[in-house]
Image: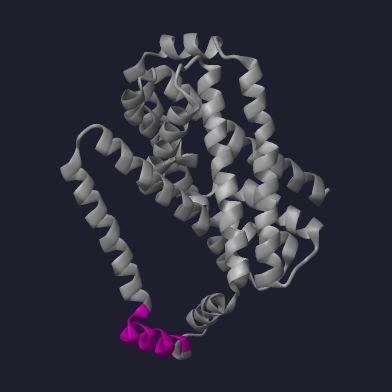
Amino acid sequence: MNNKLLLIIKIFIAVILLIFLIDYINGKEIIKTLKKIDLFYFLFALILVAVNIFLLYKKWLIISAEVLKINDCKKILSSLLHGFAAGIITPFRAGEYLARNIALRVDPINVALATFFDKIFNMIVILLVGWFFLILLLIKNGNLNIVFLVNIIFLFCIYLIILIVKNKKLKELANSLSIKYKLFGTFYLAIKKYKDYNFSFYLKVILYSTFHYFVILIQYTLILKAFGANNTFGESTWYSALVLFGKTIIPPISFGEVGIREASSIFFAGYFNIMNSISFNTSIIIFFINLLLPALFGSLYSVIEKK
């Protein structure tokens, strides 16, 4: 019941945000821009969805083989598809952490941690590249004081993470809790295993996360072009990286991050002379082809598999 309530609240927030943004931009302008879409660029971006799914599959294959000791390609693909279906309908995409185990049928804690490990590298790439492009934008606009402040905050966050990881008292506390509480102990032992994996494993995961990220940037660029944006490839990539950065640092308070992504798009659109209607439509289409479409495909696969 709590999960259903959270889902309803997230859908409600998404609808409210969309209504506000549509009113802010002008609904007629959005429809007018949508009608002018160049199908060639749109179809090219749509084809790249298959590339994205393939990259996610390859990364999950590497993680599953190393962490979960599973090498069955069919099971791993099935696991990924079940995750797509469950992630879109659950708050904070929490369902994906459990749904990936439907096909694998191993320790659910290990699968949940492996899924988190899979996703955290995507987030790291988005934040690092986005931070770099944000600094460039601030320098370009002469906001040097803000550049200094952003860098201080960024370095402080890194220092804080290192401090937490290296803190002996926290390690001692974690060890005592793992002895006292069985469930916590299972999680703690599973997490500790990750420091034993070799460098090549981490490098492969980072590379696939980076490839996946840049495919999304290319999709953004193609959709912007499809709506008639006159920006260069470099400007479109810059803008897209900032949009992804913006929606990542904002908590996922709406269904599928709908509304948040669009607000981030509109916020940065002004810096690149992109029409609000184009930025809005681009974000909606990116949501549809990269999140909703795989989720629908995963749901269809789940139904067929059950039958």
Q: Residue at x 59, y 46 (%)?
A: 212
Decide: is 40 above or below 166.
above
The answer to whether any part of residue 97 appears in the image is no
Number of numbered callouts drawn: 0
Q: Residue 179 at what x, y percent from top left?
A: 47, 91
Q: Residue 228 at what x, y percent from top left?
A: 50, 14
Q: Reply yes or no: does residue 67 show up in magenta.
A: no
Q: Is residue 287 rendered to the left or right of residue 159? A: right
Residue 168 or 101: which is nearer the viewer?
Answer: 168
Decide: is 112 above or below 86.
below
Chief SS of the magenta region: helix
The answer to whether any part of residue 260 appears in the image is yes
Residue 24 or 65: which is nearer the viewer?
Answer: 65
Q: Is residue 38 rendered to the left or right of residue 176? A: right
Residue 114 or 212: which is nearer the viewer?
Answer: 212
Q: Is residue 148 rendered to the left or right of residue 106? A: left
Q: Residue 152 at what x, y percent from top left?
A: 22, 56
Residue extending farthest left: 145
Residue 191 or 136: which is nearer the viewer?
Answer: 136
Residue extending farthest right: 307
Q: Reply yes or no: does residue 172 show up in magenta.
A: yes
Q: Is residue 13 rendered to the left or right of residue 123? A: left
Q: Residue 138 at what x, y percent from top left?
A: 26, 38
Query: Which contiguous range is marked in magenta?
Result: 166-178
Decide: is 151 above or below 185.
above
Q: Residue at x 58, y 71 (%)?
A: 199
Indicate how the structure is coloured in the image. one colour
Q: Residue at x 35, y 17 (%)?
A: 25
Tell me where residue 240 sits by quadrant.
Answer: top left
Q: Residue at x 66, y 34 (%)?
A: 48
